[in-house]
Image (cartoon, coloured by chain):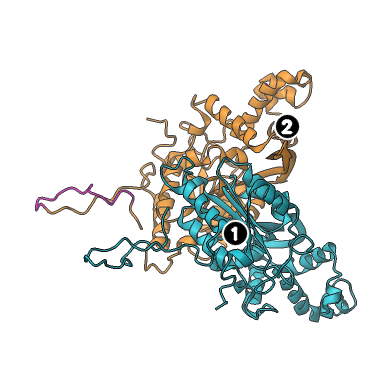
Chain colours: A orange, B cyan
Amino acid sequence: MVLLGACGGSGTESVTGMPAAPEKKDPLPSWNEGLAKQAIVDFVMRVTLPGSPDFASESERVAVFDNDGTLWSEQPLYFQGLFAFDQIRKMAADHPEWQEEHPYSVVLSNDPTQVATLTESDFFQIIGITHSGMTVPDFRQRVSEWLASARHPRFDVPYSEVVYLPMLELLEFLRAEGFRTFIVSGGGIEFMRVFSQEVYGIPADQVVGTTTETVFELRDGEPVIVRQPELHFLNDKGGKPVGINRFIGKQPLLAFGNSDGDLQMLQYTAGGDDPTFMGLVHHDDAEREWAYDRESHMGRLDKAWDEAEQRGWTVVSMQRDWNRIHPFEE
Amino acid sequence: MVLLGACGGSGTESVTGMPAAPEKKDPLPSWNEGLAKQAIVDFVMRVTLPGSPDFASESERVAVFDNDGTLWSEQPLYFQGLFAFDQIRKMAADHPEWQEEHPYSVVLSNDPTQVATLTESDFFQIIGITHSGMTVPDFRQRVSEWLASARHPRFDVPYSEVVYLPMLELLEFLRAEGFRTFIVSGGGIEFMRVFSQEVYGIPADQVVGTTTETVFELRDGEPVIVRQPELHFLNDKGGKPVGINRFIGKQPLLAFGNSDGDLQMLQYTAGGDDPTFMGLVHHDDAEREWAYDRESHMGRLDKAWDEAEQRGWTVVSMQRDWNRIHPFEE
């Protein structure tokens, strides 16, 4: 195990004038000492320490993370949904008929009570119209502009700052230990690629997500990839292990999620050769973030929680295990 | 540019007793000096030499390679097709009805004239039945056993040795220069993953290929991914840029193919910011390999060749540009 920051001349000198052993820097300072942190560090030591009976080669060190609710917040709504709403408002100038047309009229009403009545099929329609018809670079540009201008309604910071500092530390810790870190999310693959490198240090080809159909065209000789309204693959629930196998081609050693949509990804990871690590983020901190689980529409944690308890997977309590949640906290 | 093998104590001593400049080792020894080799080396220098006006950061250094006919041979038939035929022969014991049932009867006839009459739809049927119904590890095991036992009919070596040494050198050269190398092939993604690391040094998650539908299941509590007969995505022609965008999320700087099925991948690469490199392997060496292009059913090179000539892409003549083709040659 490489200890972050342990190299170099940071050791203090002892009274004998000999350099003392360099101080071991905690790679997970936002995690409180406790069972969750201990389980993570123990697992990483077991698979990375040369000579360990559970040593895994670097090519096997694959770690997968859900995004919404696991790496960043998902309240009051999936951020990609809020992006879609903002796009509807922007596009409405060219669509006067939307004032009367469901489900666009609901979005334009800005009335949370009405918005709460939107069905899954309404959401797919809203995502479809705001996420298709343009080239991939055009779409990324829209996301990029939105991230630069929109602010989270509760925290009044850009959405890309409403991320979990303890999880950023975990991503970096794993990479320092030779893991490759992947996002495996129900979110749109191109939406996430706009910020995955900058925010999480995860490059575009290590993002696995939901995909729309796309087609290749030559427009006046210029090659473009054009986004279509049809869904190509929904990377959620049983789709997550399918997406992992398709994009990564390896069973992960570590998986982290926060909801029932992550259960199959955790089951798939747990099916690999020991040791494996399965983690769930439990949103139980209404004061600093949100508290929701078994009854929530967004990010419901029910079956996966039961299975985690039965099988001894690590359930991280935001309240108990994290001394800081967001990077913007003092 | 890092010169392969230039480090270490391999320099000879000069008469003054001072070490002479280390000899620059040619990273592409199987390539004859000529326009093709020069174009490759010049391109790599332009994008990797610090201070070059065309310098590209490592995250941009994406290189994509077709497989059949570009990295390994595709004659007398795509090797994956020959694998499927061998599977049909193996499975025939449990399917006595296949002796009379088209297209299986044709395969079982072992008659090249009859086999030549198989249509694309016949091939899809043969691929479907031999490539589905099992878990992903089971399928990989079958491919693995086949690669270990089957021999190429002309060269009498395992299929995984019927690769092009100059292309192996190119892959390694590019990686030494900070490129990430990807396969982008019409071949099956799981088929290629069985040998991509060992033969090409390309890990599973850098293989982009044709995919079947797969489903996640728990079998007696064991999580498995099961291959379905339905095609999920055909990674050929216009599908190649779509696959590149979906899996890699970046426009490549370099693309190499050998047939019209690679044209769109080359067009897509050429559409990126200069400098980019587009290469085609021309099979014009019947003595050491095969000679086929405009009229061939397998790996036809016609439109892509015309476009390469018009746009100044590099067409590699196996006869002229490669002093060795296969690793097993003396």
Q: Amino acid at mark 2?
A: Ile
Residue at position x 50%, y 54% in the image: B41
Res B104 quadrant in image: bottom right
Horizontally, is A298 left or right of A221 in the view?
left
Q: Which residues are magenta?
A: A4-17
Disc sitting over residue A249 in the figure: 1
The answer to whether residue A182 shows anywhere in this view is yes
Percent of width and height locating residue B283: 68, 65
Disc sitting over residue A129 in the figure: 2
Instruction: Report the magenta stretch's main SS.
Output: loop
Res A77 quadrant in image: top right
Residue at position x 65%, y 30% in the image: A84
Seen from the viewer's position, the closer of residues B249 and B58 is B58
Horizontally, is A16 left or right of A234 in the view?
left
Q: Are marks 1 and 2 on the same chain?
A: yes
Horizontally, is B44 left or right of B267 in the view?
left
Q: Secondary structure at mark 2?
A: helix
The answer to whether residue A153 shows anywhere in this view is no
Q: Amino acid at mark 1?
A: Gly
In the displayed orientation, state which residue is furthest to the right: B100
Q: Is residue B196 above or below residue A128?
A: below
Q: CA distance from mark 1 to mark 2?
A: 32 Å
Residue at position x 49%, y 57% in the image: B175
Horizontally, is A135 left or right of B63 in the view?
right
Percent of width and height locating residue A126: 71, 31
